[in-house]
Image (cartoon, grey):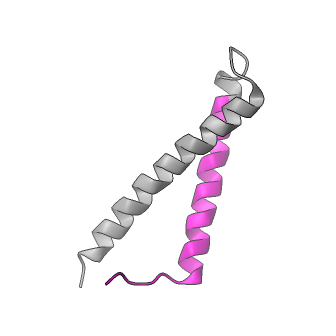
């Protein structure tokens, strides 16, 4: 059975996602948008990449802590 997380932990994960999304979006807008992509497409791609990174980070964190008693 999985342990439940606290509200504070979930808010921390949300803040991590927002910072990560901001960084990826800034990079995408600086490098991809001026060349070929529309701003909206660059932001959508940034959201997809930030979401994929968050899934990997959270899976690694939960997997590492699930093994501890």
Magenta highlight on residue 13: yes
Q: Is residue 27 above or below residue 19?
A: above
List x then y, in percent, for residue 44.
Answer: 66, 38
Tell me which corner region of the image, top left, top right, bottom left or bottom right, holds residue 61: bottom left
Q: Among all residues in the image, which is located at the extreme right?
A: 39
Q: Is residue 68 above or below residue 43?
A: below
Q: Is residue 31 above or below residue 40?
A: above
List x then y, in percent, for residue 43.
Answer: 69, 37
The answer to whether any part of residue 10 appears in the image is yes
Q: Residue at x 65, y 55 (%)?
A: 18
Q: Residue at x 53, y 76 (%)?
A: 9
Q: Residue at x 43, y 62 (%)?
A: 58
Q: Main secondary structure of the magenta part?
A: helix
Q: Residue at x 48, y 81 (%)?
A: 5
The boundaries of the magenta stretch are 1-28
The answer to whether any part of residue 24 appears in the image is no
Q: Quadrant of the C terminus?
A: bottom left
Q: Quadrant of the N terminus?
A: bottom left
């Amino acid at each position: 059975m999985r342990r439940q997380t606290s509200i504070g932990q979930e808010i921390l994960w949300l803040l991590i996602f927002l910072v990560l999304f901001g960084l990826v979006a800034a990079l995408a807008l600086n490098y991809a948008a001026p060349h070929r992509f529309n701003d909206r497409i660059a932001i959508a791609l940034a959201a997809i990449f930030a979401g994929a990174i968050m899934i990997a980070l959270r899976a690694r964190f939960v997997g590492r802590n699930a093994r501890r008693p």
